[in-house]
Image (cartoon, grey):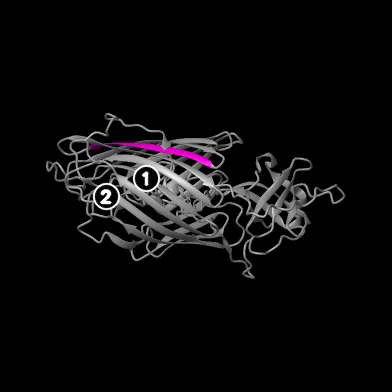
């Protein structure tokens, strides 16, 4: 069945990452140094163009900066600028910026320690101790607002991917994925835990009320140095394990069961109107895409441009690709692609290839991307069945208001015929201190040849509360596309996610 009101090529401007973009939990990093001292969790409080100074807060956990500490302002996981602490007060410190682009520093940027020997610091400019320094500002009673990290299209060498606290929540931007923090000088870990209670009235093949999770056990990220990253899902059957290596300043190499950089919200698919849309699909039905889209293979990420008002990144990858094994709903083809998961063993020699180019404009207030993917799903001994995917997405960031949307179109060649699959999603969100309200919608058409119970048209909303490293969320979504064989149209969930 074709998407309602959209013809064969439905299109919506992608309001990137519903749930996934709800990145809950701003991840507090644990730093393992020789003395096992924790990394300082600090933010920029004020910037002063006179003399290139920045005022920063002390660690929210109580640790304080000291004179001559070397620190860097980071956004997402991009290193913006670095400097040395030249004045310390009871509520914060003053930093003299001597490296990077001072004009790009914003209030709310994260601050991390960065070890540099004295000789290196002198080469970068040093500090005039006699120069008049601005006073250390007293921060407002409330916590400074942390700048939301961007999606998978991050900046500099090891980019980071949203700490995927799941998806329907605003997770601490990407802790997992092919992109991680630069400027890391001590080994660090990030761990994600989530718990979910769902209610789906009308289900007959399983319990309507059940405890669940997006990730079995834990998600773990490990940063041994600023040039290496290793992340994995800790479970009996891990869906993700990836090693990232920084080859040059602008080039990152990835290998393992890697996240697929398709759309802005990878690795969670939001096509259909919510992250992990399969949780509102019929039990045992055909999925549109894997809830966590990963695959065995290799990938590259190259930073083409990194300017204040224009950044561009290119992703390329080669992976095993989707296999067959699903049943053709039309019953006319023995080899039909299976989209709910990707196995560890490929069934043919024709590897899947894909890429994505992403643009960030006007200091990341506007961003958009284009993605493509091609792979064979049929086995080596059967006629070639090929899948083509094309996608586009866009995001608008206006202070505490965000709008996101995405669209994907698939053309699938079977042995005897071809068909189309398509989907889109949109999201608008508003942050109000520690609260966030989100509205979203989306649609998926699994097979253009006929209508099935797997076709969904979803509208919903979520309320998020994130006072610290733990985020609570309430969500309600409804499938408004009627079909005789459907027994469940509603989904309600309460989720707790924590990243530390």
10 Å crowding of disc 1: few (<14), some (14-19), many (20+):
many
User: Helix, strand or loop at disc 1?
Assistant: strand
Q: Does the magenta stretch include residue 425?
A: no
Provide the residue span drawn in magenta: 401-412
Q: Earlier in the sequence, mark 1 or mark 2?
A: 2
Taking the image as shown, residue 68 lies to the left or right of residue 472, namely right
Residue named by callout 2: 281
10 Å crowding of disc 2: few (<14), some (14-19), many (20+):
many
Q: Is residue 262 visible?
A: no
Identify the residue shown where x is 57% and y is 33%.
Answer: 362
**Are the residues tagged 1 and 2 within 8 Å (C-beta)?**
no
Taking the image as shown, residue 441 lies to the left or right of residue 113, namely left
Residue named by callout 1: 460
Q: How many marks?
A: 2
Q: Distance between the residues labelled 1 and 2?
A: 15 Å
Above or below: residue 449 compared with residue 144: above
Q: Nearer the viewer, residue 496 or 308?
A: 496
Q: Residue 272 carries which label?
A: none
Q: Where is residue 69 in the image (x, y as percent from the top left)?
A: 73, 58
Q: Nearer the viewer, residue 39 or 62?
A: 62
Q: Position of residue 129 (x, y in %)?
A: 85, 51
Q: Can residue 444 be seen in this view?
A: yes
Q: Where is residue 105 in the image (x, y as percent from the top left)?
A: 66, 43
Above or below: residue 450 compared with residue 226: above
Which residue, as the protein is rendered here, is positioned at the far left?
Answer: 332
Magenta stretch: dominant SS? strand
Identify the residue shown where x is 60% and y is 36%.
Answer: 307
């Amino acid at each position: 069945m074709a998407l309602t009101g959209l013809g064969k090529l439905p299109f919506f401007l992608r309001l990137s990452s519903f749930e996934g973009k709800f990145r809950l939990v701003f991840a507090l990093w644990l730093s393992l140094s020789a003395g096992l001292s924790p990394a300082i969790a600090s933010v920029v409080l004020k910037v002063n163009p006179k003399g290139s100074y920045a005022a920063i807060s002390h660690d929210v956990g109580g640790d304080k900066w000291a004179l001559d500490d070397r620190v860097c302002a980071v956004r997402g996981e991009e290193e913006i600028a670095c400097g040395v602490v030249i004045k310390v007060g009871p509520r914060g410190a003053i930093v003299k910026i001597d490296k990077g682009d001072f004009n790009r520093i914003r209030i709310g940027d994260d601050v991390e320690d960065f070890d540099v020997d004295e000789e290196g610091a002198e080469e970068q400019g040093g500090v005039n101790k006699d120069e008049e320094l601005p006073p250390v500002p007293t921060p407002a009673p409330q916590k400074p607002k942390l700048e939301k990290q961007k999606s998978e299209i991050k900046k500099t060498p090891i980019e980071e991917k949203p700490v995927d606290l799941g998806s329907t929540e605003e997770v601490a931007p990407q802790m997992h994925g092919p992109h991680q923090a630069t400027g890391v000088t001590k080994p660090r870990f990030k761990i994600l835990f989530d718990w979910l209670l769902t209610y789906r009235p009308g289900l007959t093949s399983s319990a309507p009320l059940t405890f669940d999770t997006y990730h079995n056990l834990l998600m773990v990220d490990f940063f041994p140095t600023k040039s290496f990253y290793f992340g994995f899902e800790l479970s009996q059957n891990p869906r993700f394990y990836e090693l990232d290596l920084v080859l040059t300043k602008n080039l990152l190499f990835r290998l393992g069961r890697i996240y697929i950089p398709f759309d802005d919200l990878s690795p969670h698919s939001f096509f259909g109107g919510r992250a992990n849309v399969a949780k509102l699909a019929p039990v045992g039905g055909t999925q549109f895409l894997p809830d966590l889209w990963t695959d065995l293979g290799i990938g590259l990420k190259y930073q083409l441009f990194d300017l204040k008002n224009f950044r561009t990144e290119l992703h390329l990858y080669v992976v095993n690709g989707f296999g067959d094994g699903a049943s053709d709903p039309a019953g006319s083809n023995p080899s039909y692609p299976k989209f709910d998961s990707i196995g560890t063993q490929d069934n043919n020699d024709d590897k899947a290839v894909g890429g994505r180019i992403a643009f960030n404009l006007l200091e990341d207030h506007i961003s958009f991307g284009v993605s493509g993917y091609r792979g064979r799903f049929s086995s080596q001994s059967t006629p070639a069945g090929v899948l083509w995917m094309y996608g586009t997405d866009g995001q608008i960031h206006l202070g505490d208001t965000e709008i996101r949307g995405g669209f994907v179109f698939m053309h699938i060649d079977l042995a005897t015929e071809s068909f189309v699959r398509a989907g889109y999603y949109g999201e608008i969100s508003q942050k109000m201190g520690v609260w966030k309200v989100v509205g979203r919608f989306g649609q998926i058409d699994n097979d253009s040849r006929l209508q099935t119970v797997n076709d969904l048209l979803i509208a919903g909303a979520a309320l998020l509360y994130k006072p610290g490293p733990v985020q609570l969320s309430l969500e309600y979504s409804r499938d408004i596309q009627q079909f005789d064989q459907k027994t469940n149209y509603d989904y309600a969930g309460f989720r707790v996610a924590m990243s530390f």
